[in-house]
């Protein structure tokens, strides 16, 4: 598998803290690559660099062979790279359907003039956007909540709404920042199944997650960050036997042992 | 047509019916004049609402755009003999460019730098209107602006201008409504609520803020040009910073993010100084006070309050 996303020598310093040190990582198309590590290891920082939220001090990030560092955030979505957020970022006062419709932004083109004049092209596009958003809501089991303001949805539903929004525009790679944080076992299992289904559509996933059960269960590749350094990348089986990974996760042997 | 669309065009048809019947009742030219001023304010506030209520950016310089629309259109037609409609269009183009120049650097910054920039801009425009007296007529104003015409018939009387101004309002409302209920409109709301997530979804945040600022400035410019050709005389005091505060107050009274709210706010507040002598005397205090009380007790505005719309506690009011 050739890499869709390639991170090379990524370094970020926040004041006196070296959040990332020359991190290398690859994520292939159509596969789930987990990025794990203890709190403060730099996982979210890495995601934020890739998605243009944080500017790194050094390093390169290429997506499908194109250098993407320094691109404005919205351009990434147009290239087919979307993300979700660890701290929920739904559009609270907009309803669930509209939230997902925003996710179609990169996949549609009608501008200000076309919108104000309601040109036929725009009407057709609007219909397609709505249908796709409804399809996404069904996929994530949110269709009954379509007209609820997003801020009124339960926490777990807001998590799924973010996934629906990120998937709506048919991206090629999704960066998921802790999609099951704060969810119970049943919800985690369900989201895990949905992430696998996303992969089966040929979409690559980078999964930042603390839930080792989920990570080892769904991932094709696992990358381990510790103290801003990538210490291992391999299949879940390889990672579970990697001595350095086991040392990093002090007592982590049991944690991995949860995987049946 | 969607349910939202049916509701909007239902209201719009009701408004058009009321507007069509109103001149049968209101024949006194004084009240007709008040209605005309209401129409122009509604037009400005509709544009301003796109900026404040949807994109969450505040401008305290819309009186300046209103004024530039008035002065450019007035001077081009009055001093240089331009056809008034052409002058109106030229003014709109100039104002769009000015808004672009102000918006580009300030809207890139996070936070409400636009407020400061537009405040300063309004002050500068006010000074220029007074100081460039060879061109603008100075503090006493610019006179001799020709009326607009409709297929050769001048739109000079209060009643003929009534049809023009309210026609412009209906068109302005439809255009704004179309924008709001579109991909772009959703993008504007999204960038206001959660800018990171909006960008991650492909919304070009800076470009959208600048574009909606330009559109709102052009609404003000067109209203200003209509004003100039209606009155035939314009004075700098009409377009000062207090007028900007007044416009923002109308927008907030009715309800940010509700196009009907803008209509409501302008219709409610415009006649106050003209109908209540005591309000006219202390106009600026009156509008400032309303703004303050409203933001504290009813931040969602009157229409928002009637619709049961909430504002997130501790959330951004803008």
Image (tube, grey):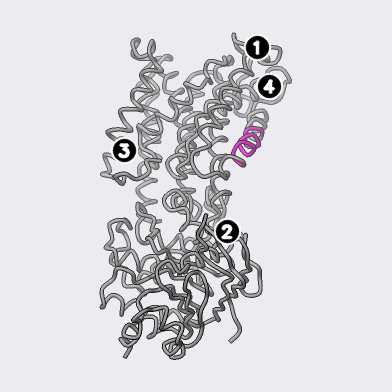
* SS for callout 3: helix
Q: Which residue is mark 3?
A: B303
Name the residue: 46% across, 22% down: B37
Q: Chain of mark 1?
A: B
What span is colored magenta in the figure? B94-104
Q: Which residue is mark 2?
A: A55
Name the residue: 59% across, 80% down: A3
Name the residue: 32% across, 82% down: A255
Q: Are marks 2 and 1 on the same chain?
A: no
Residue A161 lies left or right of residue B50; in this view the side is: left
Q: Position of residue A96 (x, y in %)?
A: 35, 61
The answer to whether residue A60 shows anywhere in this view is: yes
Q: Position of residue A202 (x, y in %)?
A: 50, 82
Magenta stretch, main secondary structure, is helix
Q: Residues within 10 Å of mark 2 (few under 14, many from 20)?
A: some
**Is the residue A113 above or below the residue A37 in the image?**
above
Between disc 1 and disc 4, whose residue precedes?
Answer: 4
Q: Which residue is mark 1?
A: B137
Q: Which residue is mark 4?
A: B77
Between disc 3 and disc 1, whose residue precedes?
Answer: 1
Comparing marks 3 and 2, which lies closer to the viewer?
A: 2
**Is the residue B52 above or below the residue B74 in the image?**
below
Q: Position of residue A11 (x, y in %)?
A: 58, 65
Q: Residues within 10 Å of mark 3 (few under 14, many from 20)?
A: many
């Amino acid at each position: 598998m050739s890499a869709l996303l390639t991170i090379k020598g990524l370094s970020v310093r926040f004041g006196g803290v070296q959040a990332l040190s020359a991190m290398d990582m690859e994520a292939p198309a159509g596969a789930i690559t987990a990025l794990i590590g203890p709190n403060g290891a730099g996982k979210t920082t890495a995601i934020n660099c890739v998605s243009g939220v944080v500017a790194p001090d050094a390093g390169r990030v290429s997506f499908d062979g194109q250098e993407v560092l320094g691109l404005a955030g919205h351009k990434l979505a147009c290239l087919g790279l979307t993300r979700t957020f660890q701290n929920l970022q739904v559009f609270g006062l907009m309803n669930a359907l509209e939230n997902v419709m925003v996710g179609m932004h990169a996949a549609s083109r009608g501008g200000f003039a076309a919108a104000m004049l309601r040109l036929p092209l725009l009407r057709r596009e609007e219909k397609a956007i709505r249908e796709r958003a409804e399809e996404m809501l069904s996929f994530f089991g949110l269709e009954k909540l379509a007209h609820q303001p997003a801020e009124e949805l339960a926490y777990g539903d807001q998590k799924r709404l973010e996934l629906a929004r990120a998937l709506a525009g048919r991206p090629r790679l999704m960066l998921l920042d802790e999609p099951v944080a704060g969810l119970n076992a049943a919800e985690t299992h369900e989201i895990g199944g949905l992430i696998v289904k996303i992969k089966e559509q040929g979409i690559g996933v980078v999964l930042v997650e603390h839930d080792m059960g989920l990570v080892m269960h769904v991932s094709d590749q696992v990358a381990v960050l510790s103290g801003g350094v990538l210490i291992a990348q391999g299949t879940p089986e390889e990672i579970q036997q990697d001595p350095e990974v086991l040392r990093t996760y002090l007592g982590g042997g049991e944690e991995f042992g949860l995987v049946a | 047509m969607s349910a939202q669309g049916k509701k909007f065009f239902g209201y719009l048809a009701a408004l058009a019916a009321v507007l069509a019947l109103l001149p049968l009742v209101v024949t006194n030219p004084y009240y007709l004049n008040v209605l005309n001023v209401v129409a122009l304010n509604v037009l400005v506030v509709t544009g301003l609402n796109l900026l404040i209520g949807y994109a969450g950016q505040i401008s305290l310089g819309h009186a300046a755009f209103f004024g530039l629309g008035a002065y450019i259109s007035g001077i081009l037609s009055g001093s240089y003999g331009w056809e008034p409609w052409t002058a109106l269009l030229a003014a709109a183009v100039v104002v769009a460019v000015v808004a672009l120049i102000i918006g580009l650097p300030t809207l890139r910054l996070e936070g409400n730098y636009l407020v400061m920039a537009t405040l300063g801009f309004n002050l500068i425009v006010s000074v220029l209107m007074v100081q460039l007296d060879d061109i603008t007529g100075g503090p006493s104003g610019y006179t001799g602006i020709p009326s607009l015409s409709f297929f050769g018939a001048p739109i000079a009387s209060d009643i003929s201008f009534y049809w023009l101004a309210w026609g412009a309002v209906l068109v302005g409302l439809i255009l704004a409504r179309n924008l709001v209920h579109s991909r772009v409109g959703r993008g504007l709301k999204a960038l206001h609520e959660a800018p990171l997530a909006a960008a991650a979804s492909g919304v070009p945040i800076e470009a959208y803020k600048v574009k909606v600022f330009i559109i709102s400035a052009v609404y003000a410019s067109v209203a200003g040009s209509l004003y100039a050709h209606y009155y035939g005389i314009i004075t700098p005091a009409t377009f000062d910073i207090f007028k900007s505060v007044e416009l923002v107050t109308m927008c907030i009274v009715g309800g940010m993010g509700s196009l009907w709210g803008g209509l409501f706010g302008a219709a409610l507040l415009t006649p106050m100084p003209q109908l209540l002598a005591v309000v006219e005397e202390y106009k600026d205090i009156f509008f400032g006070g309303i703004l303050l009380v409203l933001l504290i007790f009813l931040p969602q505005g009157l229409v928002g309050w009637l619709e049961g719309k909430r504002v997130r506690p501790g959330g951004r009011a803008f």
